[in-house]
Amino acid sequence: MQSKPVIFFLLFIAFGKTLHAQPDRWQQRVEYQMEIDFDAKKHQFTGTQTLKYYNNSPDALNRVFYHLYFNAFQPGSNMDVRSQNQPDPDPRVRDRISKLKPEEMGWHKVTSLTMNGKPCKYEVNETILEVDLPEAIQPNSTATLVMEFQSQVPIQIRRSGRNSRDGIDYSMSQWYPKMCEYDDQGWHSDPYVAREFYGVWGDFDVNISIDKKYILGASGILQNGGNIGYGYEPKGTAVRWGKEDKLTWHWRAENVHDFAWTADPDYKHITLERKDGLTLHFLYQDKEETRKTWEAAPKQMDKVFDFVNKNFGQYPYKSYAFLEGGDGGMEYPMATLVAGKAGIGTFIHESLHAWYYGLLGTNESLYAWMDEGFTEYATSEVENFLKKEGLMGGTPDENPHLDANASMIQFNKSGREEPLSIHADHFTNNASYSVGAYVKGHVILTQLQYIMGKPVFDKAMLRYFDTWKFRHPNANDFIRIMEKESGLELDWFKEYFVFTTKTIDYGIKTVEKASRKETKVVLERIGLTPMPLDITVTYRDSKKRIYHLPLDLMRGAKKGTEFTGDKFTVLPDWRWTHPTYEFTLDEKFRRIEKVEIDVSQRLLDWDRGNNVWKKDGNGEDEDEDEKED
Ligand SMILES: [Zn+2]
């Protein structure tokens, strides 16, 4: 009888925990309905795309733009020329596009386009379709764009295409005319040069008619699986027969920003139904050399989803598919394309993109590091967890992120690092782009963890997810969440890490007797990037004391050290303009054995050689009052 208030109280706690106001920022919306008729003999298809476009912006739009990604796979394209002029081209692309024969190329041909029944003027500018609308789409109104198109699937060069190295017939990603995103930074109609993606949030309803020998996997949920009999849950209606020799696969994906699919006649399809209602799908060619990985994957990925749901936010869809296809590993909403020989690490990385890309839909061209780097960070956490559980080979580490720090410093020392603020397509070479996106993005999180303390950082990552899921967070949005959760000012951190290649290097200058009972420590800042510091002092009796030295720019300090849970003493701020910092230990000099900056090695410190001061000599005791304690 007394249970009611208890229940209310518990409900309040349960919901109160994750309630973070969603941002008040407009974003566009799309609803795609596509009818695809696939001719597998010619590797071509025709499509009718009905797109309902919601202009939620305050602007009247006279023009719209579509991506026509397949047009990149033609000799002389932006992707071709860019690849041939890179000092370190992707071996998958190199000069391969320049050698494509007409029947091997990719293309989209738009045969008609109307808006609300009226014809549009349009021009194909390689991978971008530029459309002049018959009348402007007014703010807060919708328009229906109907497009007829024909496409040819290229042989696989990069990500999508036919006949992958592993022998998957069709890897259909970036495969349809896709509306470019318009946001408060304007249009994002970037020509496709093999890098990053950005899409409009919305729903996809896709009918694919294809030779009945094929088994399909896709983003979204199959609506008419009942009669297909490949293990899909018997939900929708019976399979609709298109032409005699074809099956029509009807898919729906809701609240996503892209749609990908694959097809192969030799797919084996296994599923795992999770307790939370999510079905994991695995479609792969059952081959001797890759069987072990694919058979082990369901159990491992089930654990991964448990871990990630708890630590990075709840996956909200009812389906996720691991599809053998593509040329390595590539993420799409509710699905990933992975090569047959991909290891479990690739499965984990790509599925984590369901969070950092799939649900937190950053503009990857502008913030590739928030997509790849955050995914890398989470991958390290997940792999460490699986190692602890014995579900993955290798020994777990106390800190699984140390390698990322080391690689970042090494790359910076090579002199090739470029600022993260560069648009992903415009980095000078592939290495500076990929280290920037994957590694620096990763270490940005390790450094925030260092600044805020791990428990606070972990909560902030969940809050970031809750606040920005189904949206387009940018760098500022992310750092604001970190600020709100930690109570610290962090704009300086974002400015240094995103806009510069400046580095961190702190050292211990001197440790000396200050008075009979006191010791003076002088630290120096050698690198230009300022950071707070953890300092550990070891005494002669092996006791340790930890000091935390906040940076004035933070206007506060973290609450505790991350890994050890040790208590620390907070010292006065280090003002960022000051190259040195002095503090006094309330201890006799002879009792100090060692002073060390960042024992845990989490700080992205360029030169660790100057981080430790150790008492030299063999315990010469010139102090006369040794017996005092
Ligand atoms: Zn990735």
Image: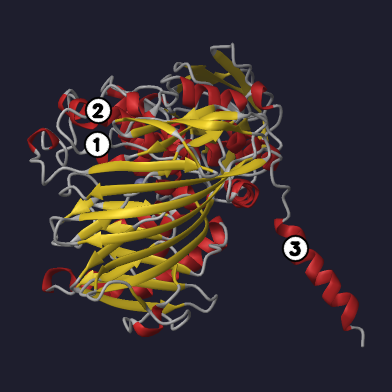
Q: Quadrant of the C terminus?
A: top right
Q: Which of disc 3 and disc 2 is earlier in sequence?
A: 3
Above or below — where is 541 with respect to 573?
below
- Residue 319, image x, y percentages: 46, 69
Kindly report which numbered mark, 2 or 3, lies closer to the viewer in this rendering. Answer: 2
Residue found 85% across the figure and 72% down from its top: 8
Q: Is the CB atom of the residue marked by disc 1 within 8 angstroms of ligand 1's nearest atom?
A: no
Q: Quadrant of residue 624?
A: top right
Residue that lies at the very extreme toward the bottom in this rendered image? 1
Q: Which residue is mark 1?
A: 72
Residue found 41% across the figure and 82% down from its top: 238
Q: Is residue 53 left or right of residue 74?
A: right
- Residue 75, image x, y percentages: 14, 32
Q: Which residue is mark 2?
A: 78
Name the mark on residue 15. Answer: 3
Q: Is residue 86 left or right of residue 448?
A: left
| Amino acid on which the number 3 mark rests in the picture | Phe
Can the viewer see residue 623?
no
Q: Are the residues tagged 1 and 2 within 8 Å (C-beta)?
A: yes
Give the alpha-carbon distance from disc 2 to disc 3, as whole Å: 49 Å
| Amino acid on which the number 1 mark rests in the picture | Ala
Residue found 84% across the figure and 70% down from its top: 9
| Amino acid on which the number 2 mark rests in the picture | Asn
- Nearest the viewer among 259 and 11 is 259
